Image: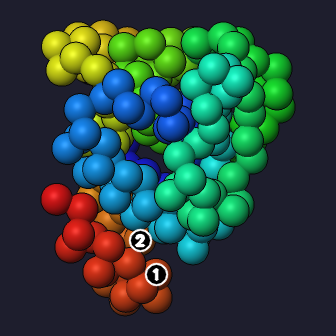
Amino acid sequence: MIALTEKSQLVVIDMQEKLSTAMPKEVINKIMKRCELLITVANELSIPQICTEQYPKGLGHTLPQMMPFLSEAKFVEKTVFACTEEPIFLRYLIKTRPQIFLMGMEAHICVLQTALGLIESGKEVFIIEDAIVSRNISNKQNALNRLRDAGCFITNTESVVFEWLKTSENETFKKVAPLIKDID
């Protein structure tokens, strides 16, 4: 299945201040660059975005360095782990956009449960593997195995970006080329 801009929605799950401090620092820095690229491309191509925050009173809000890129996103506060259990999240999902792209943390908790809920509701779920993280790499790997078995499409940042852009002649490609070079 290929990513189609007109069918896509991007979901940023729980990229929050206190939660990020529990993650491997070198991984968070790389994920931040990938998030910046994905969100920038989504903004340029008018791909709707939802950004969730798990119990922000305790875990803080979305990382401040991400906020400039999330100007188009709809924000959802939640206490449930599966975003699909939050009515406001469900209201923000666009029925005519069945491809849902997930990134964020933690892979084996909120990302996993959200993806399973979306699959159950008939969505085509794409897990951006290099833009999700867990505190423990084996938990992330276990989540990826379960997600693949459940019918999710496991992909990566560059694949999604290039599928959305379709051609190097796309004006957005020229704008984001420096960000693409900077994601490794």
Could you tell me residue 19's position as x and y percent?
A: 46, 27
Q: Quadrant of the N terminus?
A: top left
Could you tell me residue 56's position as x and y percent?
A: 67, 27
Residue depicted at 59% across the width and 14% down the height = 82
Tag 2: Cα neighbours inside 10 Å, few (<14), some, or many (≥20)? many
Q: Secondary structure at mark 1?
A: helix
Q: Is residue 70 above or below residue 23?
A: below
- Would residue 32 appear left or right of 92 to someone viewing this image? left
Please count the marks in the image.
2
Residue 64 or 93: which is nearer the viewer? Answer: 64
Q: Mark 1 sits on what residue?
A: 172
Could you tell me residue 145's position as x and y percent?
A: 23, 14
Amino acid at the residue labelled 2 = Leu
Q: For residue 126, what is the image quadrant?
A: top left
Q: Mark 2 sits on what residue?
A: 165
Amino acid at the residue labelled 1 = Thr
Residue depicted at 41% across the width and 71% down the height = 165
- Would residue 156 appear left or right of 126 to someone viewing this image? left
